Amino acid sequence: MITSISPIDGRYRKTVEGLAEYFSEFALIKNRLRMEVEYLIFLSEKGAVRKLKGEEVAFLRKIYTDFMEKDAEDVKAIEHKINHDVKAVEYYIKGKIKGKSVEDLSEKIHICLTSEDANNIAYALSMKEFLEEIFLEEVSAIGRSLGGLVKKNKSVVMVARTHGQAAVPTTLGKEFLVFKSRLERQTKSLEGIKVTAKLNGAVGNYNAHVAAYPKVDWPKFSMEFIGNFNLEPNLITTQIEPHDNLAEIFHNIIRINNILLGLDRDMWAYISMDYLRQKVEKGEVGSSTMPQKVNPIDFENSEGNLGIANALLEHFCDKLPVSRMQRDLSDSTVLRNIGVAMAHCIVGYKSTLNGLGKVEVNGEAISQDLDGHPEIVAEGIQTILRREGLEGAYEKLKNLSRGKKIAKKDIETFIKGLPVSDTVKKDLLLLSQGKYVGLAEELCEKF
């Protein structure tokens, strides 16, 4: 909407509207319903309440599977009256089963539970399903794009710059490979983190559970119930699941974002150096006053959004695992902002991917820069000379090249005057900017 305060629900709404399925108020209410209904069904399966008929189970599940926005408004209306979001869900379910065959189980809805039992499972489901269905695919798409650039540019030799200064040759494909490899490592790490959840009552001791149903093995019940959602049970908690697991996930995402921030800035630099050019979109304007401009806006947009995401994620990691004694409510409003951070991540990822798809290699500029820096083979020369045992080899190359603009003929003259065999001189003269790339191309082919 044009009147939205946040760009997530305004400018970027079309880009991230799919996240509403996981992080909107509607999604949170629906997952609470899902948890409460499944809990009642599980109580029946374990004999804590009467056996439900097949059609009764189907009816109960329809309460959340057929849940619509208008139904969410009904829940919110109840919440406005009683000023409690989870209790509103309980009352909503009671209203849905009134007059039905399961009405006799009305007082068993939410029995023994605390609000956080419903909330933590609802958030865990949102996080797990978002990671599996949206997040990992967005990151993988960038990895695939980088993979294509690795193969296409594995033999494009360029000047590598350490500390921003001409260093030694590398290939453009190898530099893309570094980012691809780093992303794959962090993605694999994230995939290995299991989302945790708890179901153990007001302070984590199953107090009400044992009082009402002393014969039930509640730790086993909790493990099986949470496991049915493909979540990892956390049996030792206070009232809240301590959020260490969320912090672990968010720290991993921060690392992914930092890798992409580095990629964004390197792409920006290569574009500014004219190593890369951007495809011109017909009808697009680059500047309000300079008609020639084709700005690297995708990488800049990504950098800005990933910075916002990381700022929020850092706060989540610092705040969420810290709670006063057995419970305070300061995590509640923070948890409601997870979707904001994830939305900024997705906007950033899509911008990076879009930017990668628009760049073209400017081979002429890369070659000219390479030809203009013959000194970048100095490392190879001094290393071979040290292998041959020439005293002061490093210092000789330092005197020749450090801080100086030298030509290829200067290097040739230097080599011809060295006190080494003609065979070694021949090897040294064969060193060139275009060939002194080590295993860069082979690495691109292997990895």
Image (cartoon, grey):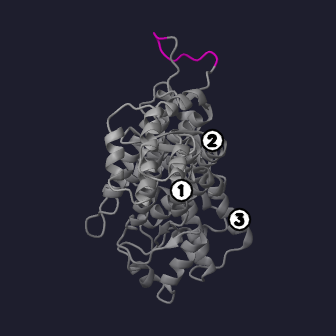
Q: Badge 1: how crowded within 10 Å, few (<14), some, or many (20+)?
A: many
SS type, badge 1:
helix
Q: Given the current orientation, which residue lies at the most extreme bottom position?
A: 215
Residue 18: image x %, image y %?
A: 59, 43
| Magenta portion: prevailing SS class | loop
SS type, badge 2:
loop
Q: CA distance from mark 1 to mark 3?
A: 23 Å
Amino acid carrying label 1: it is Ser
Q: Nearer the viewer, residue 222 or 445?
A: 445
Q: Earlier in the sequence, mark 1 or mark 3?
A: 3
Tell how many labels: 3
Residue 179: image x %, image y %?
A: 52, 49
Residue 271: image x %, image y %?
A: 50, 29
Residue identified by numbered label 3: 58
In this rendering, the label closer to the viewer, 1 or 2: 2
Residue 319: image x %, image y %?
A: 31, 57
Amino acid carrying label 2: it is Asn
- Residue at 54 percent across and 36 percent down: it is 351
The magenta region covers 282-290
Residue 322 inside the magenta-drawn segment: no
SS type, badge 3:
helix
Q: Earlier in the sequence, mark 1 or mark 2?
A: 1
- Residue at 41 percent across and 73 percent down: it is 201
Residue identified by numbered label 2: 153
- Residue at 30 percent across and 70 percent down: it is 326
Q: Badge 3: how crowded within 10 Å, few (<14), some, or many (20+)?
A: few
Q: CA distance from mark 1 to mark 2?
A: 39 Å
Residue identified by numbered label 1: 126
